[in-house]
Amino acid sequence: SNRIPHTGRNGWVNLVKFFREDRFRHLHKHMERTFNALGPIYREHVGTQSSVNIMLPSDIGELFRAEGLHPRRMTLQPWATHREIRQHSKGVFLKNGEEWRADRLLLNKEVMMTSAVKCFLPLLDEVARDFCRMLRVRVDREGRGEERKRSLTLDPSPDLFRFALEASCHVIYGERIGLFSSSPSMESQKFIWAVEEMLATTPPLLYLPPRLLLRVRAPLWTKHASAWDHIFSHAEARIQRGYQRLSSSKGLGSKAGAPGAQYTGVLGQLMGKGQLSLDLIKANITELMAGGVDTTAVPLQFALFELGRNPEVQEMVRQQVRASWAQAGGDPQKALQGAPLLKGTVKEILRLYPVGTTVQRYPIKDIVLQNYHIPAGTMVQACLYPLGRSAEVFEDPLRFHPGRWGTSKEEGQRGEGTGFRSLAFGFGARQCVGRRIAENEMQLLLMHILLSFHLSVSSSEDIKTTCTLILQPETPPRITFSKL
């Protein structure tokens, strides 16, 4: 593996380069450029981290076949250090090995299984409908044009963040926090800011050893830690409230999930079953809250933009959604099943704008990638941005084409085998634990928006993107919503 093309042997020299050239903010572009220069595999050393980077589905498949029973991804050291210093338990995001597996299996029952999705789908649907109701009122109030055809141009990102937080809280705590009222609470706005601050301060801290972390980048570390503290106290308060509500309503007595029992959200389910300690419930609920706001709000921004600049695609999706909605008689699950293009739209957005730009694994046995020998235990990163835009993998890669994910023999795909192309949520046992919540949340919102509005954009220039810990627009796109 020493013969693998590399970007420089000295990790500290590279780290200085990264800081100087602000490469962190354009990591996705840096990877794309490096693959173009060095070919489909290269090695990179940055500070304390060293990885082998790959981008072809065949190599990614090899990597995942060697992930073992307890797959590991790169540890986000700043997050782990925060938990250790504050003596908080760790959720599944930060755990590994047997401990990770035990907790993860219990969580899967409440957030991943089909039976759980059936329970929380109506909650997501209610929030998506409310969002559109609020938007219609705003278009009526502030829009221009005569009454029937009013339209309003705005940056929807603040509203999308509030939607994502409201939807998360509804599913997790089973309660509405009322973020769509005319004056949403300051505490929720502060929570959103804390999550953004936490994400933005993570990358520069990632490449330093933990002890150095606390000393050298003190101001940055302080910002990072206090952002997490805010996230924890916010979640803590909600969990306390939920706990009291559940105990008083004897919701804990009537076995959670008993037929006819009211669904009380993920928190209620976990508490009612009593298999996960209160500490671990807190740790995981906090991670779900922190991990579920930006990661759905940002792809929704990109989705509204791409639908707006591709009117023919928008119309095709809308027609399918209308037909399916009419058939479904108000059942959100039926409505989504009858409109596969919604799922295709989300897949397509995450292909072009993967919110997490890499998926990492440490193979448990030696593997061969591109004829290079990779020893067990090497950190290998699948780089999703270059993958999603590669002409070797996708036909006409820059075209926004939700139909390419259709069931009819995977049209628009290149190369043998069509596996390992859609990896925005990761893969296998360690894939994103919030995946089912996120996919359904995004699809339902897009469905209701398409039923209510026509979308357009003033400029169809590509959006400039930047990388905090996640890929987002440098400036959020402005969207014109016209009432249908």
Image: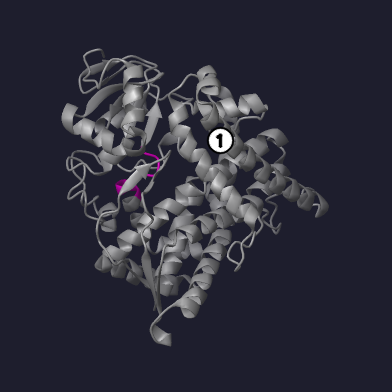
Q: Which residues are magenta?
A: 350-357
Residue 420 visible: no
Residue 283: name its quadrant. top right
**What type of secondary structure mainly makes up the magenta span?**
loop
Task: Indicate the position of residue 94 as horizontal and vertical percent values.
Answer: 54, 29
Q: Is residue 158 above or below residue 267?
A: below
Task: Indicate the position of residue 162 as horizontal and vertical percent values.
Answer: 54, 57
Going by the numbered disc 1, the residue's amino acid type is: Lys
Residue name at image x 48 percent, y 33 percent: 202
Residue name at image x 36 percent, y 34 percent: 24
Q: Is residue 150 above or below residue 267?
A: below
Q: Quadrant of the N terminus?
A: top left
In the picture of the structure, the residue carrying the numbered disc 1 is: 223
Task: Indicate the position of residue 174 as horizontal and vertical percent values.
Answer: 66, 55
Q: Nearer the viewer, residue 100 or 391?
A: 391
Task: Indicate the position of residue 140 as horizontal and vertical percent values.
Answer: 48, 80
Q: Is residue 373 above or below residue 319?
A: above
The stretch drawn in magenta includes residue 145: no
Residue 320 visible: yes
Q: Is residue 30 above or below residue 152?
A: above
For disc 1, the neighbor class at 10 Å (few under 14, some 14 to 19, many from 20) is some
Residue name at image x 56 percent, y 23 percent: 98
Q: Is residue 214 left or right of residue 245?
A: left
Q: Nearer the viewer, residue 234 or 303?
A: 234
Residue 156: name its quadrant. bottom left
Q: Is residue 363 left or right of residue 392?
A: right
The stretch drawn in magenta includes residue 351: yes
Residue name at image x 23 percent, y 26 percent: 41
